[in-house]
Image (cartoon, rainbow, N blue to C red):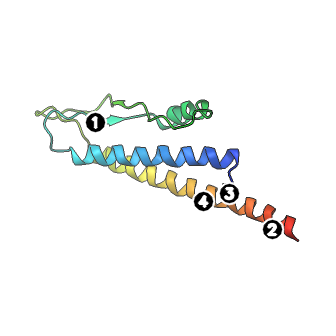
Amino acid sequence: MQVTTPLSDSLTRYLDLTTEQMKLTAENMANVDTPGYKTKGFDFEQEFSRQMNLSNAPTQAEAQQQEVDGLVSRPDGNNVSMDREGVQLAKAQLQFKLGVQLLKNEYSSVMSAIHAEAK
């Protein structure tokens, strides 16, 4: 039996999107020395809003990635900033921890409701 709530479904999408952000940041960091590589990213809030509007979709759509504007390119054409990527990674980690805690709280509430019926 699968127990889900609208909030747990939303939090699942939130965690999936946060995970995708961490993967993209890791990809950018891994390509710091690749000539011509352009930093990729997406607007988390905008993408999460878009994902929530697709809530009836059976599978989750991937984030719409784009090249990040406003970064300084080195002579080899690469524009990855390790400082920016470090901040992005820290932000994504905090978002993930928040999502996990909220999901734990949601499941705790569901379990309390189930056990209240048994008493």
Q: Secondary structure at mark 1?
A: loop
As measured in the structure, the alpha-carbon distance from the residue carrying label 2 to the one carrying label 4 is 21 Å
Picture layout, residue 110 above or below residue 68: below
Q: Disc 4 marks which residue? A: 101
Residue 9: x, y in percent? 63, 46
* Residue shown at 62% from the left, 56% from the top: 103
Quick one: 91 or 59, which is closer to the camera?
59
Residue 40: name its quadrant: top left
Frontmost of labels 2 and 3 is 3
- Disc ID at residue 5: none
As measured in the structure, the alpha-carbon distance from the residue carrying label 4 to the one carrying label 3 is 23 Å
Frontmost of labels 4 and 3 is 3
Quick one: 31 or 119, which is closer to the camera?
119
Frontmost of labels 3 and 1 is 3
- Disc ID at residue 1: 3
Quick one: 107 or 26, which is closer to the camera?
107
Amino acid type indicated by mark 3: Met
As measured in the structure, the alpha-carbon distance from the residue carrying label 1 to the one carrying label 2 is 49 Å
Q: Disc 1 marks which residue? A: 39
As measured in the structure, the alpha-carbon distance from the residue carrying label 3 to the one carrying label 1 is 43 Å
Residue 33: x, y in percent? 15, 44
Amino acid type indicated by mark 1: Thr
Q: Secondary structure at mark 4?
A: helix
Dot placed on the residue nearer the N-terminal end, 4 or 3: 3
Residue 1: name its quadrant: bottom right
Q: Secondary structure at mark 2?
A: helix
Q: Disc 2 marks which residue? A: 115
* Residue shown at 86% from the left, 64% from the top: 117
Dot placed on the residue nearer the N-terminal end, 1 or 4: 1
